[in-house]
Every structure is written in C-alpha cells, then in structure tokens.
Amino acid sequence: MRLRDINAILLSLFLVDATSAAPLTFILEDKTLGTVTEENWPGKYLLIGVGYTSCPIICPTTVIDLATTVNLLGDKKDDFVPIFISIDPKRDTALSMDEYVKYFDKNMVGLSGTYKQVSDAAKQLKATFGYTIDGGPAYPPLPERYEVYHSTYIYLYGPDRNLIDVFGYGAGGKENADKIREILSEK
Amino acid sequence: MKNKYYLIIMLILMSLFIVSLKSNAGGCEAPVGFDRVNGEMAWDSNHSVEYVALWAHWCPPCMKELQLLDKVAGVKPMNVRAIHLGNKQEQIDKVFSRLGIKHLLKEYSGDFTTLTTLGFRGLPASMVVVNGQVMYRMAGYESIDSQTVIDFIECLEGD
C-alpha cells in the first residue's frame, strides 16, 4: 500500500469524524479588522491553513497553495476567503502575519492571537501543533529558542461554517481548485 | 616480456577505471543536503554548471543560504544564481543591503508555480544544474561550507 493510499484513507477517516462536528468557530486577531470570528465573512467559503513564519531550515509553502487555489477558481474566487492562521503567536503578531500573507496575494488573510485563541482555533480545525526544544516537548511560556511543528492540511469550510473537505499538503493549487470546482458543481 | 604486457594491460585497465569514475558525476561529492536526481528536468542555464537557489525575503533559512552563495559567487560568479520568488524589488534590495550581498545578481521569478513545477514543497529550494539538466536538489538549508560548494562545482566542471 503506497503512502498516498494511506494518506487518502486517513483523510477519509478524518472527514467522517469531522462532518459530525459542530460548525467552525474561532476568535482571532487581524491587523485591519481587529478581533475577528468565523462570522466576519458572511456568505463566503473559508479556505484555511495553519503554520508559522519563523521556519528554521525549510519554510513550507501552504500559503502559496492557499493563494493559488483561490486564484485558480476564476469567477468563483470572490466567494472564497483564503486564511492563514499562525500557531506561533509568540513570534507572529497580527501585523507580521498580514505582511507575510500579503506577499503572496492581496486577498489573503493572516491571523494570529493569544496562545489560547490559536489553540482553540486549531482544536476546532482538528489541526495539531506544538513546540520542541532540543527534541523534547515545550509549552508556553516559551523561551527565545524553540522549534514549531504542525499538521499541514488545508481546510475548506462552507458559508454555514461546516467542514466540506480537507486537502493534503503539497497537492498544489491546481489540484485543490479542481476538487473545489467539482464540489461546487455538485451543489 | 610476459610481465611487461601484464603491466601494460593493468595500466590500461586502471586508466579506464579512473576515467569511468570521473565521468560519473557521482564521482563528485555533493555537499550535505543535496540529493542526486536523474536529470530528467531541464533548466535554462547560462553556464555548464550552475547552483540555482530559489528564495524569498520572508524565508529565514534562505538568508543563510544567500550568504553562502555570495561567498561562492565571489570565487565562481558565473556558476551561482539566487532567484527571488516574486517581483519584490524593494524587499530584494533591502535583503541584499542588510546581508551585505556583493557578488550575486538580483534576479526574480514572478511565478510561484516555478516551485511546484520543480517538485519543491518549501523554500529555500536549490538545484545544481549540469549542462541544462537538474542533477542535484536540496530542500531547505542548514549550513554548508562555501569551499565545499566551490570544490563541488569545479569537480563537475571538470567532468
């Protein structure tokens, strides 16, 4: 069984579990809007990824996937809000997140918050994250030097804030956009 | 007489063996972090051997690699390229000024799909291109000695 098949099975199990979950809720901070919740973009689909900006060795490109996915949706793109949430609030402020995501696309939203706010949001998404120091677990309050790890899925939520689909890391904007178009055509 | 012929044959065989080693790019030891690939991907390069790094101003490990590449470019200016992902001239200028980059040209690619087309999933994304074919790849960057890179490039040029 290939790794891709195992990944597909795990995603399917995740979706079975997630579709029985309550609608998404969160309270986070945006540079322009201030405190935001899931109600800030009424009628829009939310395409959400989590991560952080202080990568030590390699910087994942989840944000690129978010931006390119939405941009490839053509006349439907305005129905979608690509959001990147930092799970490293010690280093990433709402201001720095906004600067970071706007590099990729002016319509991207970058959010941060307190540790509790980002933890709660990650829990809602069923995203995992954590911190390590010299290979061992670390918890806030964090020192200056620590590493961050996190799950790398992209989550699609509908205007009702129910989970619609989850995309694996590295699928790429084109593959994600094709799947979304398929989903929209079935509605 | 027999020994003389035997010696000649041995010398010929040894020469052939050494030539086969040198003509195999695997005979050039790649810096730690680089993986040998099969050369199926083409890259439009200006030189027979190029170290090409894709970077972005928001990428911390990219800054470290830029500093390495600047040192290498001070010795092998034709063999190193650092290409910023995104047309962000102001940010590129700021980074070059802050890091004191002197030997690298300021190049950029406006298209992020370059990264995914090449099969990379993060930055920095580096390649060593030999005669227009990507022969080595590295995702991410920790630390490489500049002399190691210079020696590697010169070895590949000699093949």
Image (spheres, coloured by chain):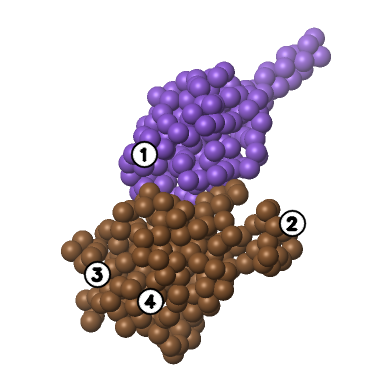
Q: Is residue B89 above or below residue A185?
A: above
Q: Is residue B136 visible?
A: no
Residue at 58 percent across and 37 percent down: it is: B64
Label 4–label 1 contact, CB within 8 A:
no
Please provide percent x and percent y for residue B43. 40, 35
Residue holding disc 4? A38
C-alpha span from label 2 to label 3: 43 Å
Q: Is residue B113 visible?
A: yes
Q: Is residue B144 left or right of residue A120?
A: right
Q: Is residue B118 above or below residue A37?
A: above
Q: Quadrant of the N terminus of chain A?
A: bottom right
Q: Amino acid at mark 2?
A: Asp
Q: Amino acid at mark 4?
A: Glu
* Chain depicted in brown: A
Q: What hue represents chain B?
A: purple
Label 1–label 3 contact, CB within 8 A:
no
Residue at 77 percent across and 17 percent down: it is: B6
> Could you say whether the residue bearing mark 2 is in a helix, strand or loop?
loop
Q: Is residue A15 above or below residue B51?
A: below
Q: Are marks 2 and 3 on the same chain?
A: yes
Residue holding disc 3? A79
Which residue is farthest left?
Answer: A75
Task: Work out whether mark 4 precedes mark 2 in sequence or the reverse, and give the earlier one.
Answer: 4
The subunit carrying tag 1 is B
Task: Work out whether mark 2 precedes mark 3 in sequence or the reverse, and give the earlier one.
Answer: 3
Instruction: Mark 4: give few (<14), some (14-19) or many (20+) Cα within 10 Å.
Output: some
